[in-house]
């Protein structure tokens, strides 16, 4: 079910601390056909409608080279989300799930990400398919899809798994 701002059965909200200033800047705006959450797809599809990512000055020069990539990762700020739920019931059926086990827009820092297909670049705009956000959603960042990106700088001498003099430890599933 799509949420406006209601709390559903068994969901838990907390008193969220006041937002500190992480220094984020909105670098553009995303234009989509959707003005209501009811009609916005839950996840974008690469055969979905073409949407327009408008880049603001002074960031337009940073688009140089993006056209080398068929797919881009787009990060955006889900500005109309509540931010205080730790347990959520996506199906509104009383069964709850932890926020960090979901891709719900309701999260302490409402960052959305999508892998989009780049159709073309037109001046300060990217025309893409694969988004799932409301018209006017603020843009945070654009990066090449990580599966298509090869680091341009040489590898670090220490290797990927050394952090300073300590070996990083990884949690295993299960
Ligand atoms: N693809 C992103 C992700 O996985 O991080 C976002 C997924 S989220 C489930 C997409 C939903 O967020 C949409 O269906 C809509 O209900 C909601 N949404 C989209 N734009 C929003 C906005 N600007 N503010 C609040 N909610 C938004």
Image: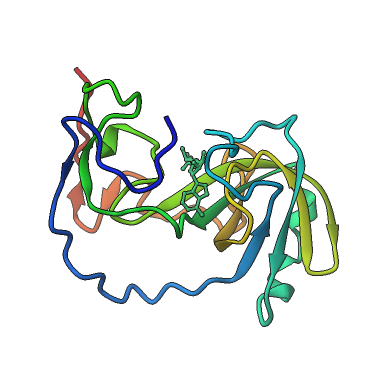
Q: Is residue 91 left or right of residue 87?
A: right
What residue is drawn where x is 65% and y is 46%? 34
**Image quadrant where one finds the C terminus:** top left
User: Going by the picture, which residue comes out furthest to the bottom?
Assistant: 58
Along the line of sight, the residue nearer the viewer: 38 or 110: 38
Residue 46: image location, x then y, percent: 70, 32
**Image quadrant where one finds the N terminus:** top left
Q: Is residue 159 left or right of residue 89?
A: right
**How many callouts does the rendering have?**
0
Residue 16: image location, x then y, percent: 17, 60
Residue 137: image location, x then y, percent: 57, 59
Q: Is residue 101 left or right of residue 136?
A: left
Q: Is residue 137 above or below residue 102?
A: below
What residue is drawn where x is 31% and y is 76%? 21
Along the line of sight, the residue nearer the viewer: 55 or 42: 42
Residue 124: image location, x then y, percent: 78, 69
Q: Is residue 122 above or below residue 127?
A: below
């Amino acid at each position: 079910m799509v949420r406006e701002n209601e709390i559903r059965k068994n969901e838990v909200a907390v008193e969220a601390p006041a937002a500190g200033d992480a220094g984020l800047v909105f670098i553009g705006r995303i234009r989509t056909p959707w003005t209501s959450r009811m009609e916005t797809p839950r996840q974008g599809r690469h055969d979905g409608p073409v949407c327009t990512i408008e880049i603001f000055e002074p960031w337009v020069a940073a688009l140089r080279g993006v056209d080398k990539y068929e797919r881009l990762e787009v990060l955006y700020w889900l500005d109309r989300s509540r931010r205080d739920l730790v347990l959520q019931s996506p199906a509104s059926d009383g069964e709850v799930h932890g926020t960090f086990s979901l891709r719900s827009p309701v999260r302490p820092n409402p960052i959305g990400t999508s892998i989009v297909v780049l159709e073309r670049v037109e001046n300060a705009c990217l025309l893409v398919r694969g988004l799932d956000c409301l018209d006017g959603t603020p843009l945070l960042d654009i990066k090449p899809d990580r599966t298509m990106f090869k680091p341009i700088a040489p590898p670090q001498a220490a290797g990927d798994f050394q952090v300073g003099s300590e070996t990083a430890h990884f949690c295993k599933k299960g």
